[in-house]
Image: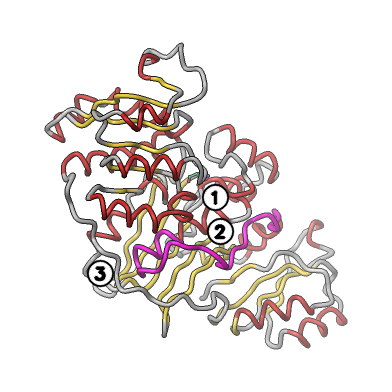
Amino acid sequence: MARIGLLGHGVVGGGVAEILLKNAELLKGRVGQGLELAAICDLRDFSALPYASLFTKDAQALLARPDIDIVVECMGGVEPARSFVLRAIDSGKHVVTSNKALVVAAGEEIIQKAAEKGVRFLYEASTGGGIPVIGPLRQNLAANHIGSIAGILNGTTNYILTRMRDGGASFAAALEEAQQKGYAEQDPAADVEGDDARRKICILCHVAFGSPLSDEGMFTEGITLLEKQDMLYARELGRSVKLIALGERVEGGFRASVAPAMLPGDHPLAGVSDVFNAVLVNGDMVGDVLFYGRGAGQLPTASAIVGDIVDIALHPSDRAIEPPAPLRCLDALSGQVRLFSRVLCPLTPGAQQEVEGLFPGARLVTVEGEAFAEEFALITEEGVESELRARFERFDLPHGAVIRYISP
Ligand code: HSE
């Protein structure tokens, strides 16, 4: 019997309790031992629940219980989650978390302590919600040098972009729907400004490129500057706008960033809609591998957590697979790209001259219809991204969001 102590009974923690209780027989049969939910710590009142007797408000008491083998942290945020996790590991308990902020802020320290104490620290649910991606990258793809990871890693923003594209909702209404469905972070700025996706690509780069668990200074742009018209230009061009988290191995190291991108219609990530996430990984031996599934939500995320619990119950003393030798993190904007932007004035000869002066060879795009009479869009030639972005800062004409235009 493995006994589990749960810290936090919010959206995800509640899902973990539900799975452990509902699928107890299935899990017992598959693991060969029961996975017993022994205690839950949450400061709120859950006295109406059928398993109310498991609740405590005293985290330290839960962590001190010698009969608890695995602590599942679903509190979110860095503190006090970090202190509780370190305390659990100090007491010889394994830890599972879905908390990407914790993994990025304190992962190095926690991993080191877990190695010293001979316990396991798993965090599959921190990235990609219900999609298994950390485990496969770590183990099933261990034979590969990973060349690139391109992901739609935030369900909330993908949901908002899908609703905007389909014309059904404004940005604010779509965000509210995502909050109601339990997809959004407590502070949804973390979703829409790209911070959540940045933490997740940082975790994947650690697993794939051996880089430190630190997202400091990583180029991050969210979806707050995007408008419905961007989606309509994309549709006109046979493309989709997605928030893409990217990690790519290049000469001398790797680059990582989060930014909106206009993907060709036949790109494997172009059709990923609603709350779904997908991660396209390229390995030097396997080629392309695509992971797809629900990237947020109660039961999908809890499903990944319970997968980690099962792994620990079956292999409590497994040595962690080492990350590969670390690659050096390079300037995210040093690669060659094309950029797209709306220009918010009519396409007069003067405007055309201005565009061509600053962006020689740019392709100009117009869309029929009254809503587009006062604007056009430009797609630059390929160039070094930092230089192209700097040119947009010098651009005299009013313009919209700058979006990576993925070739072809
Ligand atoms: N707010 C996150 C998202 C939750 O929307 O993807 C899952 O990490």
The amino acid sitting under disc 1 is Asn
**348 above or below 177?**
below
CB under 8 Å between callouts 1 and 2? yes
Q: Does the magenta segment cover residue 118? A: no
Question: Which residue bears the numbered disc 3?
Answer: 286
Question: Dividing the picture into quarters, in which one does residue 23 lie?
Answer: top left
- Residue at 52% across / 67% down in the picture? 264
- Mark 3 and mark 2 lie on one chain; the one further toward the N terminus is 2
> Which element is circle 1 on?
helix
Disc 1 residue: CB within 8 Å of ligand 1: yes
Q: Does the magenta segment cover residue 218? A: yes
Which residues are the magenta region? 202-228
> Which element is circle 3 on?
loop
- Residue at 50% across / 24% down in the picture? 43
The amino acid sitting under disc 2 is Leu
The amino acid sitting under disc 3 is Val
Question: Which residue bears the numbered disc 1?
Answer: 158
Query: How far across and down, in percent of the image, does residue 55 sit?
Result: 40, 20
Query: How far across and down, in percent of the image, does residue 194 sit?
Result: 58, 56
Question: Which residue bears the numbered disc 2?
Answer: 243
Query: How far across and down, in percent of the image, does residue 46 sit?
Result: 47, 17
Residue 311 left/right relative to 39: left
Rendered image coloring scheme: secondary structure
- Residue at 50% across / 49% down in the picture? 273
User: Within 10 angstroms of label 3, few (less than 14), some, or many (20 or more) residues?
Assistant: few
Q: Nearer the viewer, residue 356 or 254?
A: 254
How far, Cα to Cα, is label 1 from label 2?
7 Å
